[in-house]
Each structure stands twice: as structure tokens, then as C-alpha cells.
Amino acid sequence: MTPVKASTARNIALFPWLKFVESLTFWQAVWFLYFQQNLSAAEAILLYATYEVAVTVLEVPSGYMSDRLGRRRTLIASALAMLSGVVLLAIGGSFGIFMAGQALIGAGMAFWSGTDSSLLYESLAAEGREEEIEVHELRAWRFSYTAAAISAVAGGALALLDPSAPFWATALAALVVLLLVLACTEPARQAHREALDGIAGLRSLKASLLNPVLGWLFVISLLMYVFSHIPFVFGQPFILEALSGIGLASEAPLISGTVSAIMMGVSVAASAFALRIRGAMGLRGMVLLAFGMQIGLSAVMALSNAAMVIAVLFLRMVPNAWSQPFIMARIQPLLSSDSRATYLSLKSLCGRVIFASSLYVASGSTSRVGTMAYGDIRSILGWYVLAGVVLFAGLFIAARRIGATQAD
């Protein structure tokens, strides 16, 4: 085996562990509660919008950077930005510091977006194993969400000791991510010289966007991004409100972490049935089912804030498990190496623009003092559900116009 092959094989071996450590986000289940201790509910929403704006600004440039400068360099930049961002959030102290931390985390996510999957696919391609992409994407999903489950409950427990502890733990994980990325090697890419030609990259990107299969998957992916993150943003204040009704508000950080851990665990379990469901329903049917589940989850949260409804959040990541690995595996062979990361970044950009814009509107309809009331949560979720039903109908009609062989 040649040195290049050996290095490429190492990338493939390291990839699931890279996804595992990158997903050790100990702050995930307590971030909103953490911000609300120092700021208002409206400012907490605006801080998340700051993160989204930062990703939005850098999303496509980072994809272009990845296609031109390489996967490894871009992932190194991501790890450094993430490390710096979570340290600032741990330090805290003022709205400005929180904003800077959120902006750096957003930059880290932008650099990561699309580049990680591109590294995997191109490493497999260098080995002549492209047909294994679906299996490896699903495996990476399981590693990622197992880590997310572990860090969620651990982060909730850490927050009871010190509100900033989950952020310091995440900083340590980001440092390990950096070390793992440094151990990777840039995979040899097809048409590498052409990749240096920006015009060639723009041509292939245009061709990708005009492909009916890629176009449909592009739209549903960005909408699923939005509806996946609605419970992420509003789930924590929802849990706090539900627990307040039964006198357990002080336990919100730990329970929120436990809910997130169960959520990730259920997702990993659901992924065990994913290949079977895909075979029975096809890609279009499976992805539409997943999108419908996301809309339904928000609808249930809008209908009641009873404590038992918290259990519905356990299902939040199941739609992702039944869609994201398969969407990624379907689109990778259809993309050119000179615009692969740019396409993926553009897809993420559109989703983030839509979500950040909707959050900006939502922040204007909630309290600027104290925590978010359930009445505000219900109103905001109601509008999201209404929009989701309309969009689902449009996607269903569009899906019927795409040949089953092409789409699936």
C-alpha cells in the first residue's frame, strides 16, 4: 500500500472517532438556561441568532475555502474557532463576550459544515470504496449521537455544580478534535487542478443546483434543518415551564440534560432500523416521513405544556437519523470534487438564513425581561407548524414529479 493510501485509510479509521469527540457538546442541554441566568429570554434568543448569523456569513466562503485550500486545513480552522468560542462562553460576564463566543462557535460550525463529509467521501474514493459511503455515514451518525447523549446528561449534571462547567468540558473536547484533525491527511481529490479554477467550480455548482434530485433534496434538507432546531431553541424554556407547573423548576438543568441524552439514545436506536425503512419506503418516502415527524413534534409542544409532553422531545433526533445519513450518501456521488463542500455549505447557508430570520421575528414577540412564558412558546410554535404543513404539501407534490429511480 502506498503512503497516500495508508494515510487515506487512516482518515477513514479516525472519522467515526472524530465525529464522536466533535459531538461532545456538554453545553447543549443547558445553554439557554445558562444565558437566561445572566440575560433576558429575548437576549438569549438573539444570542442564538448571533450564532446563526455568524455561520450564515461564513458558510459559503468556508465551503469555497474547503474546496480550494483543502479539507484538513479547513477542519483545523474549525477546531480552533470552536475552542476559542466555548472558552469565551465559559468566561462570560457581558452580552458582548457572549456574542463573541457565539460568533466564534458559528465560525467553527461553518468551517466544519460539509467539509467533514467531503473528507470521508474523498478518502473512500481514494481507496476505491465509494459504494460504502452510506454505511460509513450511518456509522458516523451513531458515533456522533452516542457522544451527544453522553455529553448531554453529563453536561446537565456539571451545570448543577457550576453553570460554566459544561463549557469548560466542551473546550477540552474541542482540543481533542484539533489533535485528531492534525492526525488526518488531505485526501487526493479527482480533478484537483480543476478545483483550483474558481470558474470550473462555479460551473459544476450550477449544474448541481439544476439537477432535479439535488434540487429537491436541497430544499427539504434546509427545511428539515429549520424544524430540527425549533425544539433545540425552544425545548429548554418549554421544559422549564413544564417543570414549574409541578414544582421542579430547580431541576431543569439536570432534567434537560437527561432529556437530551435519551433523545440521542433513541436516535441511535432508531438508526438500527433505518436501512430497513429506506428499503421499504425509498428515499423520498423516508425523508418525507421524517419531515412530517418534525412538524408533528412542534405541534404537540404547541398544544400542551403538561410535564408528560416533555417525553415527546425524546423523538426529536429520530427524523435526522432517518434522513441525514441517506441524503448525504445520495448526493455525494452526484457532486463534483471542485464544488462539493461549496454545495453543502450553500445548502446549510439557506437553512440558517431562514431559521435566523424566523428567530429574529420570534424574539420580537416574547418577553424582554425574565424567562420565556409558555404562551409565547405556544404562539411561536403555532406559526412554525402552520408554515410546515404548507411546505410539506408542496414538497410532496414535487416529489411525485421526480422519477422514483432518480430520487431513490
Image: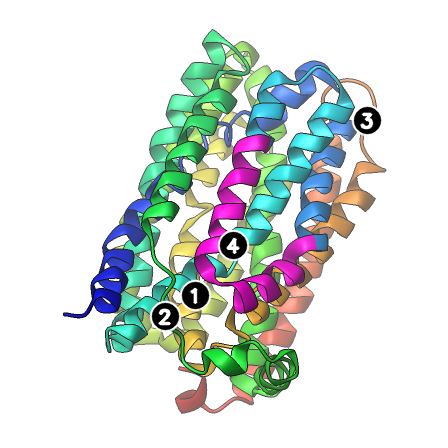
List the residue tagged with mark 2. Answer: 122
* Three-letter residue code for mark 2: Glu
Q: Are marks 1 and 2 in contact (CB under 8 Å)?
A: yes
Q: Which residue is located at x 29 percent, y 57 percent?
A: 11
> Hey, which residue is sitting farthest left in the picture?
1
Front residue of 291/357: it is 357
Q: Is residue 372 magenta?
A: no
Provide the residue designation for mark 3. 367
In the depicted view, which residue is nearer to us: 336 or 260? Answer: 336
Q: Amino acid at mark 1?
A: Ser
CA distance separating discs 1 and 3: 42 Å
- Whole-percent x and y of residue 236? 58, 29
Q: Residues within 10 Å of mark 2 (few under 14, many from 20)?
A: many
Give amino acid for label 3. Ser
Measured in 3D between alpha carbons, the distance from the residue under mark 2 to the one under mark 3, in whole angstroms, is: 48 Å
Say which quarter of the image contains residue 279.
Answer: bottom left
Task: Report the mark closest to the observer, 4 or 1.
Answer: 4
Q: Earlier in the sequence, mark 4 or mark 3?
A: 4
User: Is residue 372 shown above or below 231?
Assistant: above
Q: Earlier in the sequence, mark 4 or mark 1?
A: 4
Q: For residue 223, which quarter of the picture?
A: bottom right
- Specify whether residue 337 is in view: yes
Q: For the residue marked with disc 4, what is the amino acid? A: Thr
Question: In this picture, which residue range is highlighted in magenta?
Answer: 58-84
Mark 1–mark 3 CB contact (< 8 Å): no
Q: Report helix, strand or loop for mark 1.
A: helix
Determine which residue is flagged by label 1: 118
Q: Which residue is mark 4?
A: 74
Estimate the x, y position of residue 316 in percent, counting from the top left: 47, 45
Looking at the image, is mark 4 or mark 2 earlier in the sequence?
4
Task: Note whether 322 is above or below 245 in the view shown.
Answer: below
